[in-house]
Amino acid sequence: MHEAGAPTIAQDDQTSVVWGMPGQAVKLGGVDKILPLETIAAQILRFAEERSR
């Protein structure tokens, strides 16, 4: 998704129970933003608003 130009988010390690999959996405460079769980929904809405302009 990241390589195709889609915005990508990973949950941060501090709020993840297991950081396996998000950590690998970060390690591979496939993430635009690393955020705490409680802020991810708001960021998705911001990405959607930016795309609709």
Image (cartoon, rainbow, N blue to C red):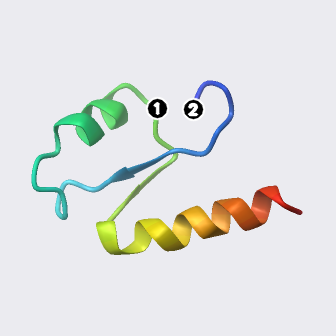
- Reading the image, the residue beneath label 1 is 30
Q: Residue at x 79, y 56 (%)?
A: 51
Q: Residue at x 35, y 37 (%)?
A: 26
Question: 10 Å neighbourhood of mark 2: few (<14), some, or many (≥20)?
Answer: few
The x and y percentages for residue 36 are 31, 66
* Left or right: residue 10 compared with residue 20: right
The x and y percentages for residue 14 are 17, 62
Residue 27 vs 42, above or below: the answer is above
Q: Amino acid at mark 1?
A: Gly
- Reading the image, the residue beneath label 2 is 2
**Nearer to me, 39 or 33:** 39
**Nearer to me, 32 or 39:** 39
Quadrant of image for the N terminus:
top right
Quadrant of image for the C terminus:
bottom right
Q: How many marks?
A: 2
Q: Residue at x 24, y 38 (%)?
A: 23
Residue 25: quadrant of the picture = top left
The x and y percentages for residue 24 are 27, 30
